[in-house]
Image (tube, rainbow, N blue to C red):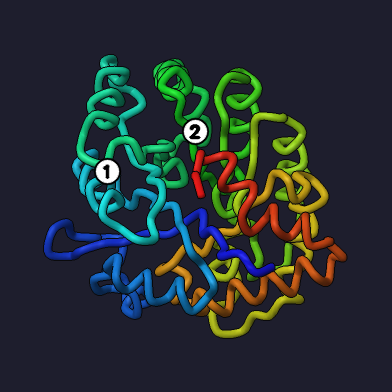
Amino acid sequence: MSAARIDAHHHLWDLSRRPQTWLEPPQMAPIHRDFTDADYESAAAGAGVGRSVLVQVLPDAEETREFLALAAGSRTVAAVVGWADLTRPDLAAELADLAASPGGGLLRGIRHLVQGEADPRWLARDDVRAGLREVAAAGLVYDLLVVPHQLPAAIETVRALPELSFVLDHLAKPPVATGEIEPWAGLVRELAAEPNVTAKLSGLITEAVWDDWDAAALRPYVDVALDAFGPGRLMFGSDWPVCLLAGSLSRWSETVSALLADAGLPDAEREAVFRGTAARVYGLKD
């Protein structure tokens, strides 16, 4: 494929503007520093990535506004998945305000850190479902950040909201490090049976043993995703700079290329994973 790839999932942060307490544990030291748009642009160019989707890091609407303004002047960032409080009664007004802010036309989705919620059925709450309906009404997609035990509530929610387009981040973080496949695989297949869900091939190397992984360790999980969603509903994402804990953006991109080739995908289907699906779902224009 000669066309530049789309990275459907990366982050940026400036510790002087907004502390990132999740980076304070010792194992996070390699990425406990600032990561700028210029840093990402350099890493992306080395991996053949030409456009990207910048995804929220913290539950902070001001961060989303900053990301939108940054995207408006970026040569690489083509869309933003931001954050808004799904439970607030005036969410529709908040989403309209975000869309009207500088760069607001690049807002394509909303995400909440559901993986950090203690209630495994948080997505099934009435106030959360009401907020998700507002996300759909605003013409935005919703990025699902869940872990395997939260998938049952995610499946119920996707079925309850057929009008909303959902994107599963990081394949719901399967237990790559242990090599277990079930019940994750069965739940992902059940989720993928719903037509309003797509998924990102992202975040898998940080679920593996960071300093001891290869394509073979990831293949069972990628194969499940390919079989369940098909390449037309899968998109490549780097999860940069979090991925740096286990490997570079280039290494991950090359690994995905190898896994898709090993699966026998023709060029058109690999093109879907690396460009087409993300462009369609997030409304990216050439």
Residue at position x 52%, y 36% from top?
120
Between 204 and 92, which is closer to the camera in this rendering?
A: 92
Residue at position x 73%, y 38% from top?
192
Sequence order check: which comes first, mark 1 or mark 2? 1
Q: Position of residue 53 (x, y in %)?
A: 44, 52
- Furthest residue in direction bottom, as rendered: 211
Q: Is residue 58 above or below residue 84?
A: below
* Location of residue 33 (image quadrant): bottom left
Compared across the picture, whether 196 is left or right of 117 comes to: right
Compared across the picture, whether 212 is left or right of 122 comes to: right
Name the secondary structure under disc 1.
helix
Q: Is residue 30 above or below residue 124?
A: below
Between 114 and 110, which is closer to the camera in this rendering?
A: 110
* Mark identifier at residue 267: none
User: How many marks can you see?
Assistant: 2
Q: Where is residue 51 in the image (x, y as percent from the top left)?
A: 46, 58
Q: Mark 1 points at which residue?
A: 64
**Quadrant of the image for the N terminus?**
bottom right
Between 215 and 37, which is closer to the camera in this rendering?
A: 37
Q: Is residue 223 above or below residue 206?
A: above
Whole-number angstrom distance, CA of label 1 to CA of label 2: 15 Å
Name the secondary structure under disc 2.
strand
Q: Position of residue 159 (x, y in %)?
A: 65, 22
* Mark identifier at residue 141: 2
Q: Position of residue 264 (x, y in %)?
A: 87, 65
Tell me the kind of residue under disc 2.
Val
